[in-house]
Amino acid sequence: QSSAFVGVVPGSSRSQCFPFEIDGVQVGWVPPHVASQLKSYPEVFSVFPGGAVFLSPSLDSYTRRSEAVDAVLQNFRKQGSFHCLKGWRDEKYSVMARFCDPPLMWMERAATSLFGVTRYGVHINAYTVSASGEVSMWLARRSPTKQTYPGLLDNMVRAYGHFTQQQCIFLPLKCI
C-alpha cells in the first residue's frame, strides 16, 4: 500500500531512492547513501539492491520498532554519520503512511529526512488591519541559539506531529 506516495517532481532525486516500508506499508523514501549505512544493522533493516528498505518483521510493535530504530539513530549520531543529526532535539515524531493513519512508530524528528518520512505541521501567521485599511503582518524571529535556521524570520505559531482536530483548534490559542 503506497498510495500516499504518488509521482515524482521533475528534478527530484526521489527516483533514485528506495521505498521505506514498515509492516508492508510504505512510509517514506531512503536515499542510497542512507540505505548503504542501514545495511550495517540487519537485525533492524533489510536493504535490497535496487529494491526497498524494510523494517525487520520481528519488530512487531510500535514500541519495538521505535526503540530499535532509535538505537541505530543514536549510533549514527554518536559517529557523526549524517549532518542532519546535529540538529537532534529529543523530539519523538510519529511515522505513518498518511495523516489519518495510526502511527507505526516514532522517530527522532531530526532523522525524518533520512527516511523521507512525511512531516506534518500546523503553521499560523498573524496580521492586523488598521482603521485606514492598512494590513500589517506580524513576524516572529527564531532564537539566535536555535539549532535550525537561527535568527531567521518564522511563523507566529507552529506545531509538529500528529494532532487531533480538537488539538489543532486549541493549541494555537494557548500559544498566542
Image (spheres, rainbow, N blue to C red):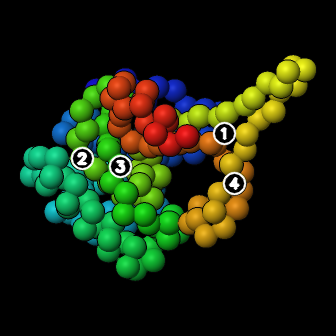
Of badges 2 and 3, the one in the foreground is 3
- How far is the residue under mark 2 from the one under mark 1? 30 Å
> In the structure shown, which secondary structural element does the residue marked by tag 4 occupy?
strand
Q: Quadrant of the C terminus?
A: top right
Of badges 1 and 3, the one in the foreground is 3
The residue lying at 50 percent from left, 43 percent from top is: 175
- Of the numbered discs 2 and 1, the one sitting upstream in the chain is 1
- How far is the residue under mark 2 from the one under mark 4? 32 Å
Q: Pointers 2 and 4 in contact (CB under 8 A)?
A: no
Query: Which image quadrant for residue 4?
Result: top left
| Amino acid type, label 1 | Gly
Q: Nearer the viewer, residue 115 or 146?
A: 146
The residue lying at 55 percent from left, 32 percent from top is: 8
Residue that extends furthest to the bottom in the rendered view of this protein? 79
Label 4 environment density (alpha carbons within 10 Å; few <14, some 14–19, many ≥20): few
- Of the numbered discs 2 and 4, the one sitting upstream in the chain is 2
The residue under label 2 is 105
> In the structure shown, which secondary structural element does the residue marked by tag 3 occupy?
strand
- How far is the residue under mark 4 from the one under mark 1? 32 Å
Please tell me whether residue 64 is drawn above or below residue 12 in the rendered image: below
| Amino acid type, label 2 | Met
Q: Pointers 4 and 1 in contact (CB under 8 A)?
A: no
- How far is the residue under mark 3 from the one under mark 4? 24 Å
The residue lying at 36 percent from left, 63 percent from top is: 90
| Amino acid type, label 3 | Tyr
Asked whether residue 50 appears in the rendered view, the answer is no
- Of the numbered discs 4 and 1, the one sitting upstream in the chain is 1
| Amino acid type, label 4 | Arg
> In the structure shown, which secondary structural element does the residue marked by tag 1 occupy?
loop
The residue under label 3 is 93
